[in-house]
Each structure stands twice: as structure tokens, then as C-alpha cells.
Image: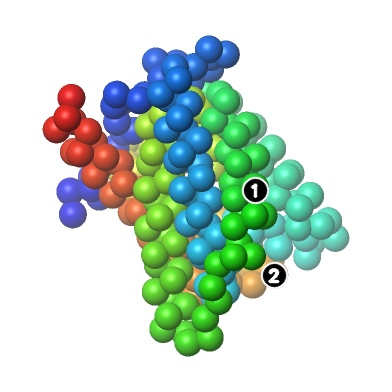
Amino acid sequence: MRFLSVKTVPKLSWSAPYALTFKPPFLSMVYLVFGLVVFGLGEALIVAASIGVSPWVVFAQGITNVTGWSIGFATFITSLAVLVCWLPLKQMPGLGTVLNAILIALVLEYLLPYLPVFENIVIKIVYAVFGIMVAGVGAAIYLIANLGPGPRDGLMTGLQVKTNLPVAWVRTCLEIIVVTAGWLLGGSIGIGTILFAAFIGSAIAAGMHFLQYLFKERL
């Protein structure tokens, strides 16, 4: 359980020296894209499990109930608000920040229709848990690439620096706050929502810990 104490994103052979660069190292770009695709696969598996959406979607649903906005517009405004929160946290955007939204959306769009759908609730839960594990590894890969986190990941890493708490704790607390706010505003939650909020932070931390061990052995 040592991964629960991970506090920083490791620097490995594919980590870019700077997040904000217009000439990123080729290897960093490869791992960035690969990590985002893997994360998108994890999210697609969670959606296909159909036992609850992610906490941030619940929050967007809640905003929609209050404002009358569409889910897409509410998600967009939420992402902008999260990016504004980066300013006091001194987080640096990069190509990964932009590609995060584009590639994950593309993976969901083109992969989701081909994923099997199950009726058995136990299989659905296993499906969702596996999706969370895959998403955690994908997030770890693209965060280590150091070419700019996605809006929510940047909020996580920024808060980690400010609080000096482990990554898993920070992300879990963040997801619980978001899903609680969304539920209070009228968003709908399910078993998958609760599983995602409880374990995505640990999955990301476990992914970073595993990759650091695996690739440091090869350096």
C-alpha cells in the first residue's frame, strides 16, 4: 500500500523538462497521447458499465438543474472555472491540457459503441472497477509525460503541492466534494459514481508508483 503515500508526479525517461513548450520531446508526446487514449478507454468502460456517471458529470447535471444549461455547456463552464483555480495554485498548462479534452472525447465517441454491455449487476461493478484501474494508469502515464495536465488533474496536483498531502488523498477528497455538491444540486449518482469518487485517486497514485518502480529499474 506504499502507493497511498505518493506525493509527487515522478520524473521518468519520457518526462518533458517543461510543461509549456511548443517543441516537446518526441518520446514525451508519444507517452502523452498513449496515456490519454488509455484514460479514455477507462472512462469508456465506466460509461459502458452504466451504473453511474463520474462525479464531475454529476456536478454538471446539478448545474444544469439550477441554470437550465445543457450538460455540455455546464461541463465547459466547469472546466473554465477549474482552470481559473489554477492561477493561485501556479499550475502550468501545456499541449496535454488541450489534447486532454480532444483525445478523450474522440476515444469515447468512437470506442464506446463497440464495448459490450452487460445486464448482471456484479459484472457491471467489475466492469466499472476495471475501468477505474485503467483510467488511473492512463492518467499516471500522461501526467508523468509532463506536458500539461487536464483541468481536474492540474487542480489535483496544485492542491497536493499546497497541502503536501498524498495524491490519493487529495484526489479522493476533491471527487467527494464535487459529487456531494452535484448531488445536492440535483445530480444523479449510482454505484459507479461512488466507486469512481472513492478509488480514482488511489488508482492514479498506484499507477504512478508502479511506473516509477518499473522504469527506474530500467534506467
Q: Residue at x 53, y 86 (%)?
A: 119
Q: Residue at x 29, y 26 (%)?
A: 12
Label 2 crowd (10 A; few <14 / some 14-19 / many >=20): some
Report the amino acid beneath label 2: Gly
Residue 16 x/y as whole percent: 41, 20
In the rendered image, which residue does mark 2 sit on? 186
| Figure check: 57 above or below 216 | below
* Side of 126 relative to 77 (left or right): left
Label 1 crowd (10 A; few <14 / some 14-19 / many >=20): some
Residue 112 x/y as whole percent: 61, 62
Residue 127 x/y as whole percent: 44, 71
Report the amino acid beneath label 1: Ala
Q: Which mark is residue 51?
A: none
Quadrant containing the N terminus in the rendered view = bottom left
Query: Does dot 2 land on a helix, a strand or a loop?
Result: loop
* Side of 150 relative to 188 (left or right): left
**Contact between labelled residues 1 and 2, with CB atoms less than 8 Å apart:** no
Can residue 158 be seen in this snapshot?
no
| Figure check: 207 above or below 49 | above
Can residue 141 be seen in this snapshot?
yes
